[in-house]
Structures are given as C-alpha cells and as structure tokens.
Image (tube, grey):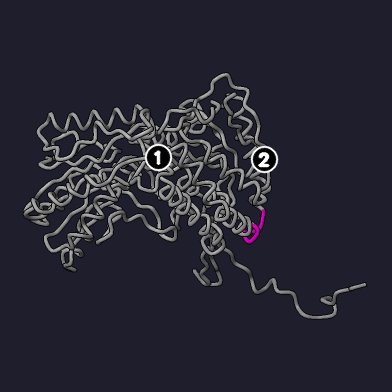
C-alpha cells in the first residue's frame, strides 16, 4: 500500500481523515513515492487553534531559551543533512549535490535564528524631554503561516519558521503538494530538537487549504514563495483580511557581459546559473546580455552547453535533474517552440532530450537561443527550465535600459574587469539583488533576500533583519518618574527579614 503522509498538529503526527489524497511522484520515473492529504476544514481549524493556544505560553519563554531550541535544531539539521538531501532528491529530481546545497542554505537561516536575542533588541533614549525617557521592545505577532514552493522544499521552509518561532511566534506551514516529504522530515527534526507542542504545525493540500490560511482571523502574517499569479492572489487575499504578507513571485534575471570580462568565468557561470536545478529557481540567469560583439562568446557558450546533460539524482555525471512534473516540462517545451516560431535562433534544442534507463522522466536538455528580442515570449515569460536567451546590445547604457524595462527585479549580475562599469551598473540598475562577477547573488542570511518590482509583493523581505521585523511588532514605552516620589531614608525603610 502507498505510504500516506501525516499532518503535524499540536506536536503529534496524525493520520488525516480526508478523502482527497495527492500523489507525490518521482519526476525521473513517475513512480508514486507517497500520498499527501488535502487537510480537512476541521484539521485546518485544529492546527490553527493549536498554534494559537501554544502562542500564549511561547511568547513568555525567555529569548535565550528560544535561541537554545534553534541551536539544537540547526545541529540536528547538520547531522541529518545528507539524509534530508536524499529525500529531497527523490521527490524533486535534483542531483544529490544540488539537494545538499538546498538543505545547507536552509541550515544557514536556522543558524541565524539562534542569534535571535541580538536581532530582537529594542532601542533606548534617555531625556527625550525633560525627565522623560523612551525605549522600545520587539514583541511577537502571534500565529504566522508559510506557503512554500516545490523548487526548494528544504531551504524555503527554513527561511520562514525558524525565525518566526525564534521571535516568539507559532507557525503553520503549508508546503508544496509536489514534494511534501522533505518539509515533513524537517518538522520531525524540529520536534526532536525539543519544540513544545503547537509551535509548528504542518498541513498539506492545495488552494482550499491556502485560502483558509489567508482568510482565518487567527493568522496574523503570511509568507509565500511561488509564481506571479498565485503570489498576487496570496497578497491581495491576505491584505484584504488585514494580515501582513510577504510574497515572492516571478523573475527574469539578466547577466550583463562586458567586453573586458574573463571569458572562462563568464561561460562557466552562464552554464551553471541557467541550467542548474533544471532552471527551476527564481534566481536563475535566463537572459545573457552581451555588450558589443557577441559571436565568439555565443559560439563557445554553445559548445559548453552541449557538454552537459540531465540525469538521475544519484548520477555523479548529471548536471541537473528533470522538471518537477510532466505539466512543467510541457510548459517549457511550448515556450521553446514559440521561441523558434517567433524568430529566435535556436542554437541548441533540448526538446527531444532522453536519459538512458529513465524513459518516463520529465527531461529537458540544455537549450540556447540567440537573436532574442524583448517582444518574444521566451524573453517576456519566466521559463523555469534549462533555457538561456542571448541578447546583444552596443553599450552598457542599452543594457541598463533593457534590464530596467523588465517588470521583474529579483536578481541580476554584471561580469566585467572595470570598476567604474560595475559601480555604474550596481547604482543604476532597478533590481534588488546585484552580483558583480557573481552569477546568482543570493545574500547570506544576515542580510535579507530583497527582490524588487513584480518579483515581490509586500514590505519586509525574507530572512535577515527584515524578516525579524516582519514577524514582530514594536512597542514603545515613554516614562516619567517624579523626584518628589522618592521615599526619604529612615527607620521606616528597614526591611524585616524575620
């Protein structure tokens, strides 16, 4: 019988009473790994009620004790990193090394959550007026929720619940129904670290369960990572119901290559950043913008693209894995077809890619286009596959105009040996995360993940100081004490210790 995943409610992994089960498949074979429950309305209510009840006690737990929970948790995550990565590989198709990286980037945020005491410190000012002092406290919100995507089933949940819980909140996690095994394992280890019942709830399902979190009056904040249309729905619905929301949506990331850049570094970076993780990451480079003559660059890029291939998670020679689903594969193939129909030059076409021994996998080979223009579908849309579009411009100013005209602003890079060109680009580009000779400029967790424009809806970003602000309220106290109230010294001040 196919294994059925449990829900985590009030500290217990419990079997769902649903009659709707979602198959979780291995994208390299289509074999069903398990079934995830679409949590019932009653189970959703139980999870939220448990989180609300737990918050009443958890918010009073000293910050040092909350930090120690995160210290124990990050140690367990490190101990079980390879085990988690193997689970992740099987349900996402990622190569084992890529999966370990997914887990590690989450561990880094859990480490940062152990530093919560300094992150939550308030501010103090004496004598803001005569004999009046002010100070601020940072206090938790209550029950928070996270809705996470398929492409990083370890990293992105770990972006959310460790910091939220360390800050004194409780949390309801609704992971992607396409790869829920990894988040369940993360939750098991969190319970093993000594988490009190109710601090973390894990519920499974689809839109119905998401909408419950977005509209329930006891949920105070919602964090989401996913596609543009869903991100817009989440943001609108959550804010209409008076909740805080941070919604990370689509991207179309450009790498600008100046003529003085080092060719070997550029080619290697373009191959890895466009095809790594099968292109299924919001920080993937999907457009290469060559400033000046690009023919020699693109010829060499084609040769390097032709050398890589997808494969199974445990194939050490595989550069990346399959698309997450047949539907995702078909979407990529449709966009490749449209690119050819709209006049782009398809130098390398991965549409007919196969992998020996795995005929049913969702394979797409590395695909390279040149002669791409901004009016083409493959330029406008986020492909989310191992596809790179090459564009040629004459000047850095034209490159900046191209990038700034994009409705997205998640990440961008410039490769150059000229400091003045790099400074001009980083100063003028309208993108939240900029790399200089770095292809995927994802910040470490003591900074924040800062996508702009149509890549993000909300006010405060993920992890770092901004996430702590997102998950907390500030209370400001202004006080005055009168000198006339100071008791006079004398026998009446003695304390009877008998």
**Mark 1 surroundings within 10 Å by alpha-carbon count, few (fewer than 14), some (14 through 19), many (20 or more):** many
Q: What stretch is highlighted in magenta?
A: 61-65
What numbered label is drawn on residue 110?
A: none
Q: In which quarter of the image is the N terminus?
A: top right
- Magenta segment, prevailing SS (helix, strand or loop): helix
> Is 63 in the magenta?
yes
Q: Where is residue 486 in the image (x, y as percent from the top left)?
A: 70, 74
| Residue 281: x %, y % from top left | 34, 44
Q: Residue 265 lies in what quarter of the image?
A: bottom left
Q: Name the residue under label 1.
A: 312
Q: What element carries label 2?
A: loop
Give the quadrant of residue 34: top right
Q: Is residue 112 left or right of residue 371?
A: right
Whether residue 424 is visible to the viewer of this picture, yes or no, is no
Q: Does the magenta stretch include residue 429?
A: no
Q: Residue furthest front?
A: 357
According to the picture, the residue beneath numbered tag 2 turns out to be 11
Q: Which residue is drawn at 38% across and 32% down?
A: 358
Residue appearing at x 61%, y 29% in the figure: 45
**Element under label 1?**
loop
Q: Residue at x 12, y 40 (%)?
A: 372
* Near-viewer residue (343 or 295): 295
State the separation of the CA atoms marked 1 and 2: 35 Å
């Amino acid at each position: 019988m196919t294994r059925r995943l449990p829900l985590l409610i009030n500290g217990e992994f419990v079997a769902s009473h649903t009659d709707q089960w979602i198959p979780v498949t291995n994208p390299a074979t289509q074999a069903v790994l398990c079934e995830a429950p679409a949590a019932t309305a009653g189970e959703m209510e139980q999870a939220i009620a448990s989180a609300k009840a737990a918050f009443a006690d958890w918010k009073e737990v000293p910050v040092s004790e909350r930090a120690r929970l995160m210290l124990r948790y990050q140690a367990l995550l490190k101990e079980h990193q390879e085990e988690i990565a193997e689970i992740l590989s099987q349900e996402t198709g990622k190569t084992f090394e890529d999966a370990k990286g997914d887990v590690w980037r989450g561990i880094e945020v859990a480490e940062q959550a152990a530093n919560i005491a300094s992150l939550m410190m308030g501010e103090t000012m004496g004598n803001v007026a005569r004999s009046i002092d002010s100070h601020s406290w940072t206090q938790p919100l209550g029950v928070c929720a996270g809705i996470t995507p398929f492409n990083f089933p370890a990293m992105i949940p770990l972006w959310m619940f460790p910091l939220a819980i360390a800050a004194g909140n409780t949390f309801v996690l609704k992971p992607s129904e396409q790869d829920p095994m990894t988040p369940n394992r993360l939750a098991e280890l969190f319970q093993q670290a000594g988490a009190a019942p109710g601090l973390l709830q894990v519920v499974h399902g689809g839109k119905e369960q998401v909408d419950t979190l977005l509209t329930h009056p006891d949920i105070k904040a919602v964090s989401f990572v996913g596609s543009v249309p869903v991100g817009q729905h989440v943001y609108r619905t959550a804010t209409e119901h008076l909740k805080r929301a941070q919604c990370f949506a689509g991207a179309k990331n450009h790498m600008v290559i100046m003529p003085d850049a080092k060719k070997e570094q550029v080619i290697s970076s373009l191959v890895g950043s466009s095809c790594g993780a099968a292109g299924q990451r919001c920080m993937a480079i999907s457009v290469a913008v060559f400033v000046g003559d690009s023919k020699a660059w693109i010829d060499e890029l084609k040769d390097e693209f032709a050398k890589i291939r997808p494969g199974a998670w445990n194939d050490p020679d595989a550069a990346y894995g399959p698309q997450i689903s047949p539907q995702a594969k078909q979407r990529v193939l449709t966009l490749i077809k449209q690119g050819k129909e709209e006049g782009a030059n398809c130098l390398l076409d991965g549409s007919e890619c196969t992998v020996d021994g795995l005929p049913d996998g969702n394979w797409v080979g590395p695909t390279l286009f040149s002669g791409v223009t901004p009016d083409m579908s493959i330029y406008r849309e986020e492909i989310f596959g191992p596809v790179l579009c090459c564009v040629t411009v004459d000047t850095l100013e034209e490159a900046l105009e191209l990038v700034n005209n994009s409705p997205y602003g998640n990440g961008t890079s410039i490769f150059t040996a000229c400091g003045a060109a790099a400074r001009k680009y980083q100063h003028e580009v309208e993108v939240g995360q900029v790399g200089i000779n770095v292809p995927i400029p994802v910040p470490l967790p003591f900074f924040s993940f800062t996508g702009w424009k149509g890549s993000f809806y909300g006010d405060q970003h993920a992890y770092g100081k901004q996430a702590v602000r997102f998950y907390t309220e500030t209370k400001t106290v202004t006080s005055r004490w009168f000198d006339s109230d100071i008791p006079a010294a004398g026998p009446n001040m003695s304390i009877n210790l008998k």
